[in-house]
Every structure is written in C-alpha cells, then in structure tokens.
Image (tube, coloured by chain):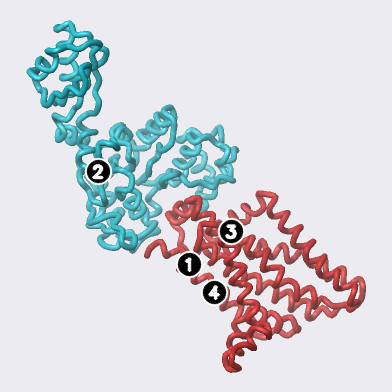
Amino acid sequence: MIPALTVMKKELWGYFNSAVAYIFFTLFLVTLSFLFFRVYFLVGIVSMNEFFNLIPWIFLIFIPSVTMKSWAEEKKSGTMEVLFTMPVKDRDLVLGKFLAGFLFVSIAILLTLIIPALVSITGTLDMGPVVTSYLGVFLLTAAYISIGNLVSSFTTNQVTAFLFTVVVMFVLMIIGTEPVYSIFPSFLADIVRNFSLSYHFQSIQRGVVDSRDIIYYVSIVFLFLFYNVRSIESRNW
Amino acid sequence: MNTIIEFKNVTKNYGNILAVEDVSFALNKGEILGFLGPNGAGKTTAMKLITGYMPANKGSVLVNGKDIRENPLDARKSIGYLPENNPLYTDMTVKEYLDFIAQMRQIKDRNKAVESAMEKCGIKTVSHRIIGHLSKGYKQRAGLAQAILHDPEILILDEPVNGLDPKQITEIRNLIKELGKEKSVILCSHILSEVEAVADRVLIINKGKIVADDTIDNLKERGKGNNIFVVEFLEEEKDAKEIVSKLENIGKVEQPTNLTLKITASGEKETGHLLFKTAVENNWKVTQIYLESNSLENMFLTLTEIEGGEK
C-alpha cells in the first residue's frame, strides 16, 4: 500500500475507534435537519436551497473539529518524530491526512442524502441543482479540510488550531458576501469576491458547473496542501 | 573496522542557539557507541540529524557512505530510531501500532516482522492491549519493537531507560545488549552508568562539542587518580588522616568532619582493599568505607564542567 493510503487508513481508524465519529455524524445530521426543516415547513416550497445555504456555515464549526487534531496532536505527543523518520516523503503524510479528513466528512455528507430523499416525498424536487450543489459541498469540504490541516500544523494546541481554523474559514466565507466586498473599491471588490469560498459555492449552487469554480477549489486545495508540506518541512529551517 | 555512520564537521543551530558545533565522529559496524552528555548538551539534536529528522546547517552526515541529505529515504530504511520520551500512538494496541509502522516501512511480510519484533522485545503477552494502558516498561519495549521492526543495521536509542524503575532498567539494558550483538547501536543517555553498562566506546558531548571519544577503559585510565573514597568512623581516630596519607596510590586526604575522611586515590579495587586492611590493622572503629565516585564519573564531571551542586 502506498504510504499516503497507509496514513489515511490510520487516521480514519483514529476517527472511528472512538465514539467521537458517531457523535460527530449524529450532531451534524441532527443540527442540519433541524435548521433546515424548521424553515422548510414554514416556507412550503419544495427546494433544497436553504439546506445548501446552511452547509458552509455549519461546516465552520464541524470541519475544524475534524482537522484540529491532525498535526497538532502529532506535534504535542512527539509521534511526529516517528513519522518523519520513516522512509516516507512529507507530501505522502500531508496527502494521507487530507484524504482521511475528506473521506470522513464525505461520509457525513453522504448521510445527509436522506434529507433530499425526504423532501422529494413532499413534492417534485428539481434534482439538477441538488446534484451540482452536492458537488459544490464536496469541493468546499476539500478546501476546508486543506485549510484546517494547514492551521493544525502551526500549533501543538488543538483548541488554538480549532479557533484559528474557524477564523480563517470565516474570513474566506464573508469576503464573498455583499456587505463585506462592497467595502472595497469596485476594481478590488471583484478580486476579493473571487477569492471567497462562498462566492464560488453560490455559483455552483445555482445549478451551473463552471470550470472556473472547480479550478478555484482545486487550486485552493493544492495551495493549502503545498503550504502544509512546507509547514511540516519547516523543522528543517 | 567499517564505518557505518559518519558525522563530518556538523553544526546545527536553532536560531541564535548553537545546539551542535563542528562535531565529527564515526560509528563502526557492530559497535555500541554510548553518547553521553548532560541535559541540553546537544545529544538529541545529534540523533535527530543522524535519523534525517532535520538537516545540519553545516557539515554532512553519511549513513553507509551516502549523504543523508541526498538520500534521506535510503538512510531512514537502514536506521531504527527510538526517540527521546518514546512517543507512541497510545489509543492503538501494541499489534495495531507495530502493524501501522510495518506498513509505513513497506515491509513485505508484515505479520512475520511484527511477531518477531514482539518476540524479541517480550511484548507478545500484551500485543492486544491498548498502549496507553501499559506500564512504562512495556511502553518502552513497544517503542523498541517499533525501532527494530524492519531489522535495521543501525539502532539509535535516545534515553531508552528514562523514567523506568530499576527492574525495568535492567530488563531494557539486557535487551539492548542482546540487540547490540547483531546491530550497530548509538545509545544516548545522560546517565553514565547506563552507557558504562552496555557501550564499547563512549563519546562525551558538552555544550554542543565533543569533549571525549574513547573506550571506557581508556577514559578510566585518563581519569586515574580520581577515585574518591569516603571512610566513616564510629569515634574520632586522631592519627587516621596521617596514616592514610602515607599509603600507596593515595592523593589528597581531607577530613570534612571528625568522623569522616575523604580520600582521592588511583586504583579503585586496590585502594579499597588497602583501606580495609589498614583499618583492621589499626583497630579503627569504622562504620563504612565506600567509593563516592569512580574515575569515569569524575572524568565525565570534569569534562562536562558540572558544578558541585549538580553532582
């Protein structure tokens, strides 16, 4: 097995070895269902829009709780020294941890498929935007995980990693909202908005898969993974 | 003898702090090298440089003749490393942990390697127990099993008996001796007796510099005349100091209290015997005669400039 997959397997094992994974899945599903259906039955329109509007904000709390441990715990316990003296490249370690976090949250996302299934019972649901929005959710997850893992590599304290990840994600989200980007001069506002995670997510949510949005998310993932490799290599400096 | 590790004029600093300065030494095949020094002397940094955990700022580290910077993965394959404080994944069982390490090292017959390492380290009986629930001795054995799992030519053990009780120390010491029969070992410690018990050669580092590199016998020889004996009396013996001063191989004789003599002498066993004999011949009421520190300890203390208060 290639080293990145070995690391991924071990990390996933770590999530599922305790009750944390099951608590995470339950809380995630219950919170999301409650917030969505509370509004859904009031409005009475067969649409998943509100659900996909909620997800990026709910992720702000849930994803940092997954990524905070990734490097901070290794650094704190000293196991990083064992990992870094294995005949394995740093990039394999980074990739393994990223894949584990991504797969873990992906399972939680797949569990939410029960929600559109329930909604479609109540009326005819346009599946086009639902499918593209789910694609957007997976892309957003990948971006969030890469950001969270990078932040975790800067510290030995999981709480610090959690809080800083929330802050970074929050900033990358709100710069795509009008009250924030409109503060900037018009030529800058467009650039700022394009850097935002929420702007590209909203674009996909409309049901159109634009290659620019996919390139944006893939670039964000690669950029943060690259800096994650550089960050753990910093022991060499 | 074939050199397996070569440290050539290596310097490593952390910002403004110089951890290792222009250090050169070699580890020969089949040798157990004791790496000795007080806390903060630069031992762990040297180990981290050898294992490729981090690179040197200056100089080169060669493992099997190849520069570790150019071939880090090759070097890591031939090295088994037990880091200081023995970091472990405490939520895993011993077997799960070793299996993970075997996968990371891409060992072909994982089961066989894991079984063999557990057998050698005597942890088969606890293989299905969670590491976090094990005693410190067993944890240390699990760490050692991790280090020898891929049957490396070189073993680097950083403070392997730190925090263990005397029984566990003896067990781990015997295990290291056993492993040393077929591997080249660097044993890093700040405890002299540890290194003395297992090493063929000793390297003393202080403030980032090598201050001695010799066999234990040679170091003892260099420190000859530095054995400190203490004789304690039941009641004051007025002529004792004068008589002892005239004995063979005796250096300085001090009388810290009326009932104590502190004698600096060469020849550890000979002097001990002579002091007993003299006490009997003179009918002194002696309560005890003991070796306060031997020549090697004094040599170590002199070389590492430890102040009296830290002895």
Q: Which residue in the protein does label 3 denote?
A: A159
Name which residue type carries label 3: Val
Residues behind callouts 3 and 4 on a single chain = yes
Residue for point 82% across, 78% down = A127
Using residue B230 as the reference point, say whether residue A158 is left or right of it.
right
Quarter holding the N terminus of chain B is top left
Using residue B161 as the reference point, say whether residue A39 is left or right of it.
right
Tell me, yes or no, whether the two marked residues, 2 and 4, touch with CB atoms within 8 Å. no
Tell me, yes or no, whether the two marked residues, 2 and 1, touch with CB atoms within 8 Å. no
Name the spot of residue B264 as percent of width and height, x first: 16, 26
Q: Nearer the viewer, mark 2 or mark 4?
A: 2
Q: Which residue in the protein does label 1 denote?
A: A229
Counting labels gives 4
Kindly identify which chain the residue marked by label 3 belongs to.
A
Give the Cα distance between marks 2 and 4.
46 Å
Q: Colour of chain B?
A: cyan
Give the Cα distance between marks 3 and 2.
42 Å
Tell me, yes or no, whether the two marked residues, 3 and 4, touch with CB atoms within 8 Å. no
Residue for point 41% across, 45% down = B84
Quarter holding the C terminus of chain B is top left
Give the Cα distance between marks 2 and 1.
36 Å
Q: Residues within 10 Å of mark 3 (few under 14, many from 20)?
A: some
Name which residue type carries label 4: Phe
Give the Cα distance between marks 3 and 4.
25 Å
Q: Which residue in the protein does label 4 denote?
A: A222
Name which residue type carries label 2: Leu
Q: Nearer the viewer, residue A201 or B102?
A: A201
Q: Colour of chain A?
A: red
Q: Which residue in the protein does label 2 denote?
A: B203
Tell me, yes or no, whether the two marked residues, 3 and 2, touch with CB atoms within 8 Å. no
